[in-house]
Image (spheres, grey):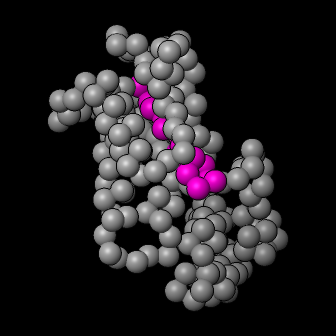
Amino acid sequence: MSALDWPAGFDRTPAKERTRNNRYEATLRQSIDDLGDELARVGVDDWRLSTGAQHQTRNPNLPYADANPDDPGAVVRWSMDGEQYAVACDAYSRLRDNVRTLYLYVREKRKMEQRPVRTGESEFANARLPSGDDVVATEPAPHEVLEVTPDADPEAVRAAYRERVKEVHPDRGGSTEAFQRVRSAKEVLLDGE
């Protein structure tokens, strides 16, 4: 049995919340082939499929045909233009459905990239993995993000949030990541209310 290489920081679907998907008729092999073709169209440098199933030695992206792992999740990682990317799916109870969903996601993103619409970043920006090995350890504590004391009262947290949002909001020249970090910090510090 291979170990599923789930990306750090990606949420998992609890096993009891996974559903059976009867809309997809493609086999696991067809879904993997389609995923590989789609990634080639995108122009990736290299890609790797990770599942909880045993993979073939000759083709490490292919699980054996009778794959039915306890963990049906699937992750595809790739490199492109010096950046690392990953998308993962474990919403469904069968491996083939999760792999098919990865293929459909990549296909839709590729199609969006072909549209003449201009955005701030690539459609794949949300799949870009952060640099460094231990992302969690480098994140500042919520009170540091809002520049308040760890035991700040709720009104001080709200006031600090309003000030920080003025600095980091994307509409005012800030980044989406910084805005999300500030919003998350406020939610964590006000969680008890």
Residue at 64% across / 53% down in the picture? 82
Residue 166: name its quadrant.
bottom right
Q: Which residues are magenta?
A: 72-86
Residue at 48% across / 20% down in the picture? 59
Front position in the image: 114 or 50: 114
Q: Give the image location of residue 127, x and y in percent.
A: 51, 53
Residue 153 lies left or right of residue 175; in this view the side is: right
191 w.r.t. 119: above or below: above
**Residue 190 in view in this figure:** no
Front position in the image: 21 or 147: 21
Front position in the image: 55 or 21: 55
Q: Residue furthest right?
A: 149
73 w.r.t. 12: above or below: above
Residue at 42% across / 52% down in the picture? 42
Q: Give the image location of residue 63, x and y in percent.
A: 43, 18
Q: Give the image location of residue 182, x and y in percent.
A: 64, 71
Q: How many marks?
A: 0
Residue at 55% across / 81% down in the picture? 170
State the predominant SS element of the stretch in magenta: strand
**Residue 119 in view in this figure:** yes
Residue 92: name its quadrant.
top left
8 w.r.t. 139: above or below: above
Membership of 190 in magenta stretch: no
Q: Quadrant of the C terminus?
A: bottom right
Q: Give the image location of residue 80, x and y in percent.
A: 55, 51
